Image (tube, helix red, strand yellow):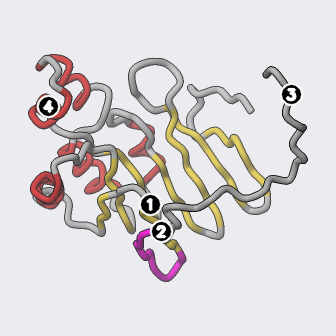
């Protein structure tokens, strides 16, 4: 359903003990939001694509898990994206959140667990280590560097990080609807 993206801490879903709120995010135009999920006494916040902003700081202070982008610095983005320097800076530090800004946000709100994501880590271990080490220069709290298929089991007692176990070559399964017969000529 539609909701007003400009409203702060707006409840957009509340059912079966789950409450989802939104706060404005700042990206490239109107409409981005960050989501706050509350369930069973736990609070998880997903920043989405956003620059650092006051709403996030104000509403993430008591979060158990915070998932927030920590985008590549301009010089790495320039190498990966082969873009002009002005666009590299804007992509890193105006449309997204830099590694350093991520650290400042996490050090301010002190979540039980921080998850950094949205870095383009295409050059393997060396780039990953730079990313991790740069964050660790300023932020020393519990941290995950998010990647595809990563899962967090969140309870009141602990937050456990693991990788999902998936079947890579699964065949399709029959659906619930009966398919129409082929149409000759189509």
Query: Where 93 falls versus 72 (above or below)?
Result: above
Residue at horizontal 56%, vertical 26%? 6
> Mark 1: few, some, or many residues within 10 Å (few <14, many ≥20)?
few
Q: CA distance from mark 2 to mark 4?
A: 32 Å
- Name the element at disc 3: loop
Tag 4–tag 1 contact (CB < 8 Å): no
The quadrant of the picture occupied by the N terminus is: top right
Disc 3 or 4, which lies upstream in sequence? 4
User: Magenta stretch containing residue 161, yes or no?
Assistant: yes
Query: Where 4 falls versus 113 (above or below)?
Result: above
Disc 1 or 2, which lies upstream in sequence? 1
Nearer mark to the viewer, of 4 and 1: 1
Q: Where is residue 139 shown, x and y percent of the image?
A: 20, 59
Q: CA distance from mark 1 to mark 3?
A: 40 Å
Tag 1–tag 2 contact (CB < 8 Å): yes
Residue position for label 3: 183
């Amino acid at each position: 359903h539609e909701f007003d993206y400009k409203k702060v801490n707006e409840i957009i879903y509340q059912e079966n003990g789950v409450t989802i709120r939104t706060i404005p995010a700042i990206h490239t135009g109107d409409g981005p939001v960050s989501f706050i999920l509350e369930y069973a006494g736990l609070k998880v916040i997903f920043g989405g694509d956003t620059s650092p902003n006051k709403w996030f700081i104000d509403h993430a202070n008591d979060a158990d898990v915070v998932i927030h982008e920590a985008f590549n610095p301009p010089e790495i983005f320039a190498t990966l994206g082969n873009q002009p320097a002005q666009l590299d800076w804007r992509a890193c530090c105006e449309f997204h959140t830099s590694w350093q800004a991520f650290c400042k946000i996490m050090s301010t709100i002190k979540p039980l667990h921080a998850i950094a994501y949205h870095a383009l880590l295409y050059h393997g271990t060396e780039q990953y280590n730079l990313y991790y080490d740069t964050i660790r220069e300023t932020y020393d709290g519990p941290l995950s560097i998010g990647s595809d298929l990563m899962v967090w089991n969140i309870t009141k007692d602990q937050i456990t990080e693991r990788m999902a176990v998936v079947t890579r070559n699964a065949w399709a399964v029959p659906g619930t609807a009966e398919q129409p017969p082929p149409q000759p000529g189509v």
